[in-house]
Image: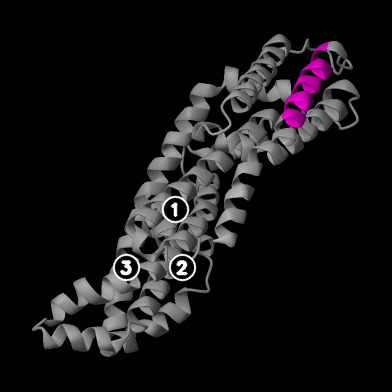
Amino acid sequence: MASETLSIARNRDVPRRIQPAVWGALLLWWALVALMVAVPDKPQGFATPRFVNETHELFAAIALILSGLAIASGLFPRLTLLAPLKRSGPWLIVLALLIGLWETVTGKLALLPAPFFAPPRALVEAYATDWARLLDSVLNSLRLLAFGFVYGSVVGFITGVAIGWSRGLGYWVHPILRFLGPVPSTALLPLSLYFFPSSFSAAVFLIALATWFPVTVLTWSGVSSVDTRYYDVARTLGANSLFLVLRVAVPAALPHLFVGLFMGLGASFSVLVAAEMMGVKSGLGWYLQWAQGWAAYANMYAALIVMALLFSSLISLLFLVRDRLLSWQRNAVKW
């Protein structure tokens, strides 16, 4: 009872403890806006800077939104929608400091050489002027990644279940895993471009191969580690081999399968970018190479930010699927 009381008291003190971080972040974001507006940029080159006012308006809007959320968090401390803001207070402080440092060393003092290091307004310009090409690259990357990841996951799941259940099949497949697994998928790019009819299909194969190996190994490990007593109980109740595989082995191996999916998704990101740089006609990897070739480094940084947000969102989506399917595991495994 005493521990529960202490826990409740701590929970009540959380808004008070993290509120200074929120207000500190708010002050720093307004200071960032003041830095951008009040301190003039140092002239660089012969072209007039573009989208300067739009950049100021964007950061002022962000500061206004944070102000509204901070005021709402003070008036309604128990509102669940404001919980992410309270948890993100320290990160908002760090982000404001980093952007302020970035703006100072590039736009205000020009300490870093242009065009390799551009101020924040250059990113705004890249998104505003080249959003159509960037959006097309994102859609093509998602299409390519979806085909490769789905194919690799399905084949890897089937292979892992098969060799985990059948020792005879595992005898023939294990050497193939040991031979192909350590080889980076990108090393097979020249061969895939020769054997496949198009660069798109070759890229799908490489992404699928990068996904297939971890999904196969982890699924095989999960099926092999299922407690034999589960099978004995199911056989006592009249279960056949198909039931044992689909209703006993596979559900018990799902935690291992999701570890393989996370590893496969991470590997597929690297292969996706490498394959797009060397083969396909559109995609984030292609966009990076195109921007670098034209010395459009602001566009390159814009694509990197989009890539990071996109891949992080896909990982978070996979976490949500895992949490929904493995909700029964929450009391046994912490995540």
Which of the two discs, 2 and 3, labels the residue nearer the N terminus?
3
Which residue is at a point 39% across and 84% down the rendered structure image?
174
- Circle 1 packing at 10 Å, graded few (<14), some (14-19), many (20+), is some
Secondary structure type for disc 3 = helix
- What is the CA distance from the residue labelled 1 to the residue labelled 3? 18 Å
What residue span does the magenta drawing correspond to?
23-37
Give residue 234's position: percent from left, percent from top: 17, 82
Give residue 60's position: percent from left, percent from top: 69, 15
Q: Nearer the viewer, mark 2 or mark 3?
A: 2
Residue placed under numbered mark 3 in the picture: 157
Report whether residue 124 is seen.
yes
Left or right of residue 157, residue 285 in this image: right
Q: Which mark is residue 333?
A: 2
Left or right of residue 45, residue 49 in this image: left
Residue placed under numbered mark 1 in the picture: 319
Q: Nearer the viewer, residue 175 or 83?
A: 83
> In the displayed structure, would residue 45 be above or below residue 158?
above
Q: Main secondary structure of the magenta part?
A: helix
